[in-house]
Amino acid sequence: TPALVRRKDGFVLFDPMTHTVGGNSGIGDFGLEGINSFIQDHSCGDVCNRLALD
């Protein structure tokens, strides 16, 4: 969610999700299935571009 952080534009992130090979990082970690689903469904947008993740 866009927000001001120390009087500068920033983001507040809620409910971070992680998927790990072992599937044991916590609730919502769907292991390799989650990783593959993310790769298949994700479309890079403004945040990825700003972080040079594309």
Image (cartoon, rainbow, N blue to C red):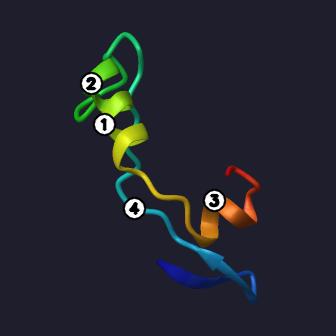
x, y percent for residue 48: 63, 59
Q: CA distance from mark 4 to mark 1?
A: 20 Å
Q: Residues within 10 Å of mark 2 (few under 14, many from 20)?
A: some
Left of 32 or right of it: where is 39? right
Q: Are marks 4 and 2 in contact (CB under 8 Å)?
A: no
Question: For residue 18, what is the image quadrant?
Answer: top left
Q: Residues within 10 Å of mark 1 (few under 14, many from 20)?
A: few
Q: CA distance from mark 3 to mark 1?
A: 18 Å
User: Which tag, 3 or 1, sits closer to the chain's start?
Assistant: 1
Q: CA distance from mark 1 to mark 2?
A: 6 Å
Q: Which mark is residue 37?
A: 1
Q: Secondary structure at mark 1?
A: helix
Left of 24 or right of it: where is 20? right
Residue ID at (76%, 85%): 8
* Amino acid residing under circle 3: Cys
x, y percent for residue 10: 66, 77
Residue ID at (47%, 77%): 1
Q: What residue would you read off at disc 3?
A: 48
Q: CA distance from mark 3 to mark 4?
A: 17 Å
Residue ID at (38%, 29%): 35
Question: For residue 7, what is the image quadrant?
Answer: bottom right
User: Which tag, 2 or 3, sits closer to the chain's start?
Assistant: 2
Q: Residues within 10 Å of mark 4 (few under 14, many from 20)?
A: few
Q: Secondary structure at mark 4?
A: loop
Q: What residue would you read off at disc 4?
A: 14
Q: Relative to residue 2, is residue 52 depicted above or below?
A: above
Residue ID at (69%, 64%): 49
Mark 4 or mark 1, whichever is nearer to me: 1
